[in-house]
Image: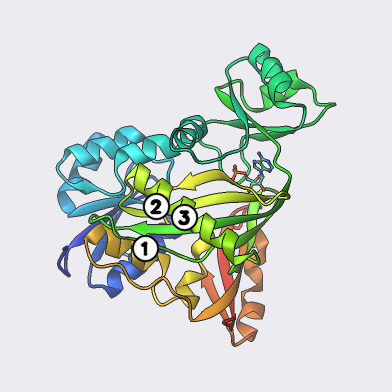
Amino acid sequence: MLSPGSTIGILGGGQLGRMIAGAAARLGYRSHVFTPDSTSPAGYVTPFVTIAPFNDTAALGRFAAAVDIVTYEFENVPVEAAEFVAAQGRAMLPGPGVLRITQDRLREKDFLRSVDVATTRYREVTSLTALRRAVRDIGPHGVLKTVRLGYDGKGQVMLGPDSDLAEAWKRVGGEVAILEALVDFACEISVIVARNGQGAGATYVPVENQHVNHILDTTIAPARIAPELAMRAEAIARHVAERLDVVGLLAVEMFVTTKGELLVNELAPRPHNSGHWTLDACYTSQFEQLVRAVAGLPLGSTERHSDAVMKNLIGSDVEKWREALADPMAKLHVYDKSEARPGRKMGHVTRLLPRH
Ligand code: AMP
């Protein structure tokens, strides 16, 4: 167990890192943030910050020497940087191998298939000819996605029977891509599971996620699904976390199809936007749970004392912070990002409701 006064290294300086650092501080730990950005939401909440690109091995070495363990708040941290830090003798949790799988949509889906977890049908696409062949296999309704560095709908093209495939191939940048069959879903849900080094696991209740322009807009906790389906979703999340051997957190995003099947869409080995409600509505937030897991502490209760609806403040929405505060049952979180660009997650508001 990591003693109070120890330092947790966090690769990435976004809002997730900011909220991890907050949870770490309450347990008596210091956080050291490694970020390429000179102004970052996480960098404002701790005096220990290294500002350097992820390929700066001298800076990574100094960072590793200054911390006791390392985690990441952003799954697009280059695997080489994670491996370099891990090679300095600091435990990297979850391990770099988890990052390697989850930062590549194709590896991720191949992994899920290898552990008997259902996903939508998909094909690897490496050329326009391969795209035409994949469309013949999968059908005309699909989503073409870059395998790397895509999030919040970036690097995605929806395909229909009238789509110009050459144009779609150009739009994903002509890099390796994945074609997924379009899922006819009733709703989207996610489950966050925590695992510590002893293999003890704990799941949060499945929540329902509503997206606008491919970006998470609202999370409803708990999801409005049948209890039997919720149990299946939690079991899938636990199974995936075990098979990936995650120590830390894993968020598992799933589609609930109109036929009542569960198909896993994406994995994230870190705190997740759809778990922000746990800060205000659960006995242990996802951020505290991550700190407990990586520090080797017993996991806390994932039970909720309230139901909740979390709404993201995207771009200029953050200007409405005064209105959010006018509701006494609303909990406002602002990430202190310098520029409210369209599509940028600037904060969130969680409205607490009596638990059902
Ligand atoms: P992703 O970046 O994979 O999480 O995709 C962002 C959002 O796009 C998802 O949450 C869905 O709303 C939508 N989406 C992605 N892939 C598919 C798919 N295969 N079928 C239907 N909707 C999808």
- The residue tagged 1 is 20
Residue drawn 29% across and 71% down?
Answer: 25
**SS of the residue under disc 3:** helix
- Report the residue at 18% width, 37% height from top: 87
Residue at (46%, 58%) from the top-left corner? 192
- Looking at the image, do the residues carrying marks 2 and 3 touch, with CB atoms under 8 Å apart? no
Residue type indicated by callout 2: Glu
Query: Disc 2 versus disc 3: distance between alpha carbons?
Result: 24 Å
Q: Residue 269: tell me if it is visible.
A: no
Nearest the camera: 199 or 328? Answer: 199
Relative depth, front residue between 89 and 307: 307
**Residue, disc 3:** 235
Ligand 1 is within 8 Å of the C-beta of the residue at disc 2: no
Residue 252 is at least partly visible in this image = yes
Tell me: residue 222, above or below residue 118.
below
Q: Amino acid at mark 1?
A: Ile
Q: Earlier in the sequence, mark 1 or mark 3?
A: 1
Classify residue 159 by image quadrant.
top right
C-beta proximity under 8 Å, tags 1 and 2:
yes
How many numbered callouts? 3
Q: Amino acid at mark 3?
A: Ala
* Disc with the residue nearer the chain's start (1 vs 2): 1
Viewer-nearest residue: 48 or 146: 146
Q: Position of residue 327 (x, y in %)?
A: 64, 85
Q: Are circles 1 and 3 on residues that touch, CB within 8 Å?
A: no
